[in-house]
Image (spheres, helix red, strand yellow):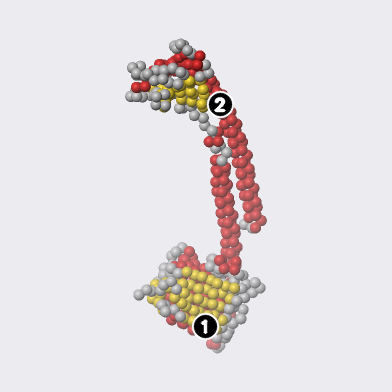
Amino acid sequence: MNRRTINAVIIIGVLSIISILMVQVFWINRTIKAQKDAVTIQERQDSLNIRQFEESVRVALRNTVEEIGSQHVDSSFLYGAVKQKSSNYFLVDINEDLHPYYLEQLLKRTFYEHNITQDFQYGIYDCFNDSIVYGNLIRFSIDSLYAPVSDSAIGVTSPELLWKRDGHYFTVFFPELLSQPSNDLNVASSPWLYVAIIVGVLLIFFAFSVSVIIRQKRISEVKADFVNNMTHELKTPISTIGLSSEMLMMNDFTQEPEKLKRYAEVIYKENKRLEEQVERVLNMAKLDRNKLELRLEHVDMHELIEETADNYRFNQTFSGGEIELDLTAQDFVVNVDLVHITNVILNLLDNAVKYSEQAAKIKVSSKNRSKGIEVSIEDKGIGIEKEQLKQVFEKFYRVPTGDRHDVKGFGLGLYYVKLIIDKHGGKMNVKSRVGYGSTFSFWIPTITN
C-alpha cells in the first residue's frame, strides 16, 4: 500500500465521520425541536385542564358555601368566601360552627355533581387551638365513589363526633394535583451525550485503523529491505563458493598444494559464513514462536567480557581498533545461557565496529544496579538520530547510514539482542548523539547469596 492510497483512506475516513456527525446533528436537532413542540403543546393542554379544574372546584365550593349559608340565619358573609391559594389548595371563609361530617358529605356531593374525581383532604380551623384539624384523605373510586383511604382513623369524619368549636374557615387540598416544570424534562442535553460517545468511539477506531495501516506499510517496507539484504548477503558466499568450486574442477592442482588449500579454505569459510547467516534467521524464527530454550548456568560476566575483548583485539589487529574495559561491578555472577549472552556482547561489539567511520574506539563497562549488573558498550561512531532510537530494536530495522553502503546485515542483530535480554528477565537501553557515538546497555539480575 503506497502513500497515496493511505492518504486516500484517511481522507475518505474523515469525510465519512464528518458526514455521520452532520446527519446525527441534523436528526437530533429535529428530534429536540419536535420534543420541545410536544412539551409546549402538553404544557398548554395541562394549563387549560388545570384552569378548567380550578374553575370547577371554585364553582363546587361556592355551591357548598351557599348550601351551608342556607342553613343559617345570616348568610351575607358567605359571598366571595372562596379563595384559591394555589392550583391545588383552596380556602373557604365561614363564620359558623361546622360539623366535619356534614362538611365532608357536602364536599363529596358537590364534587360529584361537578365531575371532580381527584383525591382530596379537607381541614377545619379550630379557633380554640389556633390550628387546622384535618379530615381523612378521601379517594374517589367507581365502586365506592368517595371514601376515606383508611377506616382505622374515622374519628373526625364520624357522625357521632361531638363538635362544638367555632370555625372561621375550612380548606380543601388536592395532593395528587402537582404541576411538573417543563425544564425537568431535559430533552436537549441527553442526545448530545450519545453523539459525543459515538463520535469518540469512531475517532478512536479510525485513529487505530490508520496507525495499523501505517505500521503495516512500514513493516512491509522493512521486510522488503530485509529480503533484498538477505538476497545480497546469501548471494555473495554462494557466488564465492561456486567460483572456487569451478576453479577446482577446471584445473589440476595436485602439483600446487598451496592453491588447492587456499581454495578449500575459501569454500570452508564462505560455507561457515552462509551457515551462520541461515542459523541467525532460524534463531529469529524460534524466538518469534517462543520455542528457543535457554540452557542456564552460572557465568562470570567479567570473565566473559574479558574473553570477548581478547577475541575482539585479535580480530582488530590490522584495522587499529581499540577496546577499553572498566569493570567495576562487585557482584558479577549471573545465571544465563552462555552461548546467547556471548552472542549479545558480540552483536553489540560488531555494531560498534560497523558504525564507526574510523578505527573503532570501544569502551565496555560494568556496574551493579537494582540487584543486577549493567553492562554498557560505548563507541565513538556516527551515532543515531533521536527519532530512530525507538526503532533500533525492531525486527528487520536498520539504521540509515546516509551515503555509506558498506554496512551489511539483516536488521536482526539488535532485535535478537533485546529478545535474549528480555528472556533473561533483563532490560535494554540505548543512548546516542549523532556524530558522537552510541552507548548500548543491558541489565540482567545477578545471583543473590
Q: Crowding at label 1, few (<14), some or many (≥20) Cα neighbours within 10 Å?
A: few
Q: Which mark is residue 324?
A: 1
> Residue 337's quadrant in the figure?
bottom left
The residue lying at 59 percent from left, 30 percent from top is 40
Q: Which mark is residue 447?
A: none
Front position in the image: 97 or 387: 97
| Left or right for 209, reference 143 | right
> Residue 338's quadrant in the figure?
bottom left
Q: Where, quadrant-wise, is the N terminus in this rendering?
A: bottom right
Determine whether the residue tagged by mark 2 lies in a helix, strand or loop.
Answer: helix
Q: Amino acid at mark 2?
A: Ser
Which residue lies most toward the front here? 128
Compared with 220, 164 (above or below) is above
Front position in the image: 292 or 234: 292
- In x, y percent, where is residue 411? 56, 69
The residue lying at 55 percent from left, 72 percent from top is 431
Q: Amino acid at mark 1?
A: Glu
Task: Look at the image and tell me whether residue 357 can be seen.
Answer: yes
Q: Which mark is residue 47?
A: 2
- In x, y percent, where is residue 189? 56, 41
Task: Look at the image and tell me whether residue 282 can be seen.
Answer: no
Judged by depth in the image, the label closer to the viewer, 1 or 2, is: 2
The residue lying at 54 percent from left, 77 percent from top is 378
Determine whether the residue tagged by mark 1 lies in a helix, strand or loop.
Answer: strand
The residue lying at 53 percent from left, 18 percent from top is 80
Front position in the image: 91 or 335: 91
Compared with 329, 44 (above or below) is above
